[in-house]
Image (spheres, helix red, strand yellow):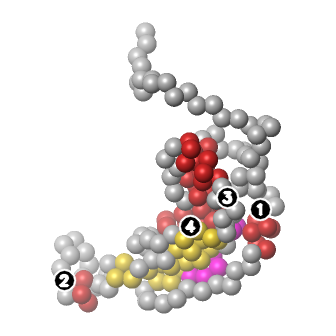
Amino acid sequence: MENPVPMQKDHIKFGYPATSLADARSRRDEAKRLLWCAPTVDERDIWQCSMRHIAHEGRCFVVSACQIQPSPAELGIDVPGWDGDRPLINGGSVIVGPLGDVLAGPLRGQAGLVVAEIDTDDLVRARYDFDVVGHYARPDVFSLSVDERAKRSVEFKD
């Protein structure tokens, strides 16, 4: 089933929002993306899920680097409402393959290097059943019209 919201689809595919239709079109030029880098400070499990989803939906490799910040006790500071022995940021760097499989990591609780051997043939195999933008790049089938006239966002009718 196709996503009926194409700009949202671009956001999912490319990992950043398209701010205009022209911007969305230029993003499609990057559709042959092999690798998407996503640095973060988000150590939560939901970030890992997001990275897997972006890799799967974009059929690309994703590398997410997450920092490590020691506990407030180790830093000699007080953070109100924070367990003094819990790290401020506990890492979670990860490398994900184009079908959403975790290839390396997540690395938590320590500084280090996350490494994975990447086979670019995985991109071809991953795109066999889902061509990220190829089926949209059909001017003989699809067209886009934009009505740029000013409109009210809310209208009340009796």
Q: Residue 34 bears which disc, if any?
A: none
Mark 1 or mark 3: which comes first in sequence? 3
The quarter of the picture where the C terminus appears is top left
> Is 9 rendered above or below residue 145?
below
Q: Nearer the viewer, mark 2 or mark 1?
A: 1
Marks 3 and 4, how far apart at CA: 17 Å
Q: Which residue is mark 4?
A: 51
Mark 3 or mark 4: which comes first in sequence? 3
Q: Quadrant of residue 124?
A: bottom right
Tell me: 132 left or right of 48.
Answer: right
Q: Amino acid at mark 4?
A: Met
Q: Residue at x 67, y 58 (%)?
A: 31
Q: What x and y, as percent, mark residue 16?
A: 51, 57
Tell me: 13 left or right of 19.
Answer: right
Q: Residues within 10 Å of mark 2 (few under 14, many from 20)?
A: few
Q: Which residue is mark 2?
A: 77
Contact between marks 2 and 1 (CB within 8 A): the answer is no
Asked if the stretch drawn in magenta spans residue 104, the answer is yes
In the structure shown, which secondary structural element does the residue marked by tag 1 occupy?
loop
Q: Residues within 10 Å of mark 3 (few under 14, many from 20)?
A: some
Q: Residue 127 bears which disc, if any?
A: 1
Mark 4 or mark 2: which comes first in sequence? 4
Q: Amino acid at mark 1?
A: Arg
Q: Nearer the viewer, residue 148 or 13?
A: 148
Q: What x and y, as percent, mark residue 79?
A: 20, 76
Q: Residues within 10 Å of mark 4 (few under 14, many from 20)?
A: many
Q: Residue at x 49, y 65 (%)?
A: 46
Contact between marks 3 and 4 (CB within 8 A): the answer is no
| Residues in magenta, as a range | 98-105
Q: Amino acid at mark 2?
A: Ile
